Image (cartoon, grey):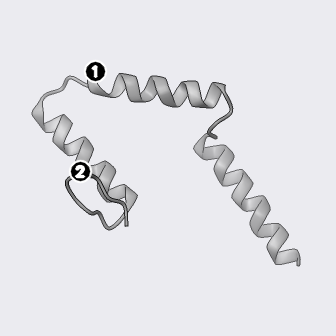
Amino acid sequence: MPRSRRATFGSVEEAVRQIIEEHIWDDDDLSWAKPLLDEARAELDRREAVTHEEFQRLMAEKIETLRGS
């Protein structure tokens, strides 16, 4: 289960939903997200991460490989 310093979540989606709700309900200022997006983009540029679409493609290939075994 995903954990933060404050709570344990049933899923990553639940954790993200809570973070978004905490920030969006405070105000409409999403400047808090900019550093996170900048870092994610930098990780993609350094090839330390993959996009969601690339991840899905890689997993589909892996599943096909396993099915063919």
Q: From this viewpoint, which residue is outermost toward the front?
A: 5
Residue at (20%, 44%) from the top-left corner? 21
**In the drawing, does residue 68 fall left or right of residue 10?**
right
Q: Residue at x 64, y 25 (%)?
A: 45
**Disc 2: which residue:** 18
Residue 36 at x, y percent in the picture: 40, 29
Give the spatial CA distance, label 2 vs label 1: 17 Å
Q: Is residue 51 left or right of residue 57?
A: left
Q: Which residue is mark 1?
A: 31
Q: Are marks 2 and 1 in contact (CB under 8 Å)?
A: no
Q: Position of residue 29 (x, y in %)?
A: 20, 23
Q: Residue at x 17, y 42 (%)?
A: 22
Q: Horizontal placement of 40 versus 19: left or right?
A: right
Q: Identify which amino acid the numbered label 1 is placed on.
A: Ser
Amino acid at circle 2: Gln
Question: Which numbered marker is on residue 11?
Answer: none
Please state, as top left, top right, bottom left or bottom right, where the C terminus lies in the image.
bottom right
Tell me the element at label 1.
helix
* The quadrant where residue 68 appears: bottom right
